[in-house]
Image (cartoon, coloured by chain):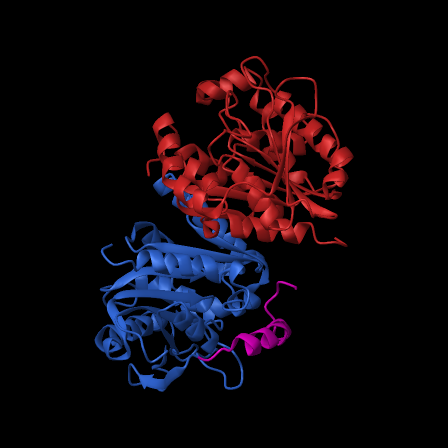
Chain colours: A red, B blue
């Protein structure tokens, strides 16, 4: 699979994965859709359960889409119900969210929306069998940017109950000037790198973090992991936990959840289980 | 678990793991022991099979021990028969080797011995059901140093049939002068870093590589991965595949094989299966 993120790559990756998702099943037994966590039409989330959870850990998933697109749920397609179903199979409650998009809404709207969604989870998830004190937030691509931005406080809100975060193929060091990509300009505008980059804050946070990169992610994803590793080692004398999704591209990486778990899901699940252990 | 590699850490790590290995079983159905691949008493290897393999991939494992110790087989203990048994459960032939030790034998004796052992495998493994054209060589700690050294040609010998290598918690950039550790001085003497370091050669080799680091590896292991990642990215515009063995120390990492496979074994097995696929 190629690495450039084109509409063809997206379509082809999902087409390859769809039969596997059909076989495994990508819907949790119970999905409560489009619950409002705010006033905007995209302040919506889906809750995925078996119907039998009691005090289960909660995985909140934030989709990608280049700041300008994407959705928690595409009818007839696995994305991203498959993440919710996989969460339920792991014994957790799954929450998949949408958020406001650029160009209408720019930085730090994504972080604000993640904060609001997590707030909703804290206030409401007990009635779905989730434990509001054991939340893990995971993002993919632009969704990871928003999760990281939330973690370091750019969107306000509380981290209460957040026991860990999964940062999948995201961007933490936003370049300045001509190095800034087209979509980044749309979301971040001309705000300086030092203002919008989450990397310095990620080095300081006490929330346990797990990262991921796909083998065939674009060069700029690999560049982010190289920069992250260098900064993390300089700060902590250790390297960060990075899942390397062997053989996968930017899209098939997140698509692999539930159907090729050795690429990403198994290690991510181990992390979620570890950080949400009771008594931690 | 602490990170400093002390006799207590070794003993405690194995004591913790032993009951799990007892439960799973750490002996392959058939183990042919102490086959000679050279003239020295430590030119010995064990072949682990079910007895039924036909043309199976072969995993050659090279133990650690700080250049001055270690063995392929400690009677009554899992180490390292458990790697052979795990190989067999994965459908491969397992080969565990010993090699000559410092201070009597110094650089590049380890690489020479790995080369000789792989040569023996090429010549003899077919009669054990192994495929001499589908070999993966893996090392741990000092064993990784020898494997890497062999891969980049420091020990001579051929790479024929070697389809991949697993480099677990090893050292690729050997420091000079006062930075060089006591055991490194014993093995490398005062040979300059540029002569004994495998890192430049690893960036050039066409043999697929997978690396690993334990979360609680000593700082110098993490330092090696940080340096490797930076050099790899500078050369290839991509980061290397590094398995991060969550929760494990230097010893329990390799001890986890077969009993905590999500820490290391599952991703390593995926790699071995991928690189030994027929037709590659």
Determine whether, in the image, residue B36 is placed left or right of residue A231: left
Q: Horizontal and vertical percent for residue A109?
A: 63, 20
Whether A48 is drawn above or below B183: the answer is: above
| Image quadrant where one finds the N terminus of chain A | top left
Q: Is residue B3 magenta?
A: yes
Q: Residue at the far top: name it.
A: A104
- The prevailing secondary structure element of the residues shown in magenta is helix
Note whether residue B150 is visible.
Answer: yes
Q: Is residue A181 magenta?
A: no
Residue range (magenta): B1-27
**Could you say which is closer to the camera, residue B121 or residue A88?**
A88
Whether B144 is drawn above or below A154: the answer is: below
| Residue beneath the point at 24% across and 79% down | B127
**Could you say which is closer to the camera, residue B32 or residue A57?**
A57
| Residue beneath the point at 42% across and 71% down | B89
Tell me where residue B57 sits by quadrant.
Answer: bottom left
Determine whether, in the image, residue A146 is placed left or right of residue A55: left
Q: Horizontal and vertical percent for residue B203?
A: 34, 50
| Residue beneath the point at 50% across and 67% down | B257
| Badge count | 0
| Residue beneath the point at 59% across and 45% down | A87
Whether A275 is drawn above or below B13: the answer is: above
Q: Horizontal and vertical percent for residue B241?
A: 43, 50
């Amino acid at each position: 699979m190629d690495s450039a993120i084109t509409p063809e790559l997206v379509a082809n990756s999902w087409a390859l994965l769809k039969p596997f998702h059909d076989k495994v099943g990508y819907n949790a037994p119970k999905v409560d859709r489009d619950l409002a966590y705010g006033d905007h039409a995209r302040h919506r989330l889906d809750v995925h359960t078996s119907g039998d959870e009691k005090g289960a850990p909660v995985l909140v998933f934030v989709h990608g889409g280049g700041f300008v697109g994407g959705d928690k749920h595409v009818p007839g397609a696995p994305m991203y119900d498959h993440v919710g179903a996989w969460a339920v199979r792991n014994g957790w409650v799954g929450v998949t969210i949408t958020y406001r998009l650029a160009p209408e809404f720019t930085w730090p709207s994504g972080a604000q929306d993640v904060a609001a969604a997590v707030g909703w989870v804290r206030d409401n998830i007990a009635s779905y069998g989730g434990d509001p004190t054991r939340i893990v937030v995971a993002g993919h691509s632009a969704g990871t940017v928003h999760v990281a931005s939330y973690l370091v406080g750019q969107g306000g809100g509380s981290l209460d109950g957040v026991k860990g975060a999964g940062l999948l193929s995201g961007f933490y060091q936003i370049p300045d000037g001509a190095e800034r990509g087209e979509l980044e300009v749309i979301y971040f505008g001309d705000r300086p790198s030092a203002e919008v980059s989450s990397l310095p804050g990620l080095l300081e946070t006490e929330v346990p973090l797990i990262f991921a990169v796909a083998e065939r992610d674009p060069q700029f994803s690999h560049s982010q992991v190289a920069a992250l590793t260098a900064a993390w080692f300089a700060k902590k004398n250790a390297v960060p936990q990075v899942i390397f999704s062997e053989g996968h591209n930017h899209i098939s990486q997140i698509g692999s959840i539930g159907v090729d778990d050795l690429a990403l899901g198994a290690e991510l699940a181990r992390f979620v289980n570890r950080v949400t252990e009771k008594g931690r």
